[in-house]
Image (spheres, rainbow, N blue to C red):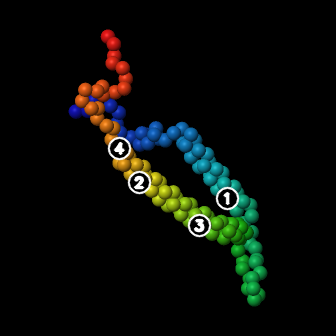
């Protein structure tokens, strides 16, 4: 039988474990992306006009202006983002490898450290003077 003073298990415990500073930063990141999305939608609505792009060999491309702008942005952003993520992944693996090596070295030094010598019979176990009563 459950105690009357226990609360039901909820997901709010997860939020309690996340520090307030990180929750605030997460809110700010979400706010930033929402504002950026609203700006993108307003830009697209105000500039929804057809544009003709002259390509090679007399080829013409008719597209809406926001599609071209966002496409050009993604064409430059995605390769850079992929490069950044790959470098971050590579560095994280390197760091984890070095941390494992350091933990192994620390483990070996703890094993290799000599155990303290036991006191010889008839000698005090420590160098401290005996307590006086």
State the CA–CA distance, disc 4 to disc 1: 69 Å
Location of residue 66 in the rendering, given as x and y in whole percent from the top left corner: 70, 66
Label 3 CA crowd tier, 10 Å (few <14, some 14–19, many 20+)? few
Residue name at image x 74 percent, y 72 percent: 50
The residue at which mark 2 appears reads as: 104
Residue 82 circle label: 3
Location of residue 29 in the rendering, given as x and y in whole percent from the top left corner: 60, 49
Query: Circle 1 — which element?
Result: helix
Query: Circle 4 — which element?
Result: loop
The residue at which mark 4 appears reads as: 114
Q: Nearer the viewer, mark 4 or mark 3?
A: 4
The residue at which mark 1 appears reads as: 41
Q: Nearer the viewer, residue 25 or 120?
A: 120
Residue 59 circle label: none
Q: Nearer the viewer, mark 3 or mark 2?
A: 2
Residue name at image x 61 percent, y 45 percent: 28
Query: Which quadrant, please, contains the N terminus?
Result: top left
Looking at the rendering, which quadrant does residue 4 occupy? top left
**Vertical arrangement, residue 24 with respect to residue 121, above or below:** below
Which residue reaches farthest bottom? Answer: 57
Looking at the rendering, which quadrant does residue 65 occupy? bottom right
Location of residue 22 in the rendering, given as x and y in whole percent from the top left corner: 55, 43
Q: Nearer the viewer, residue 122 or 39?
A: 122
Query: Which quadrant, please, contains the C terminus?
Result: top left
**Vertical arrangement, residue 76 with respect to residue 59, above or below:** above
Location of residue 64 in the rendering, given as x and y in whole percent from the top left corner: 71, 71
């Amino acid at each position: 039988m459950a105690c009357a003073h226990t609360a039901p298990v909820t997901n709010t415990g997860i939020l309690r474990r996340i520090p307030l500073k990180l929750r605030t930063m997460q809110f700010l990141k979400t706010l930033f992306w929402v504002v950026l999305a609203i700006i993108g939608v307003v830009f697209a609505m105000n500039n929804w006009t057809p544009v003709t792009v002259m390509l090679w060999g007399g080829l013409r491309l008719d597209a809406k202006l926001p599609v071209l702008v966002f496409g050009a942005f993604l064409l430059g952003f995605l390769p850079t983002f992929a490069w950044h993520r790959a470098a971050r992944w590579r560095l994280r693996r390197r760091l984890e490898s070095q941390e494992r090596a350091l933990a192994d070295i620390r483990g070996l030094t703890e094993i290799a450290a000599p155990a303290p010598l036991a006191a010889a019979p008839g000698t005090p176990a420590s160098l401290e003077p005996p307590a006086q009563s």
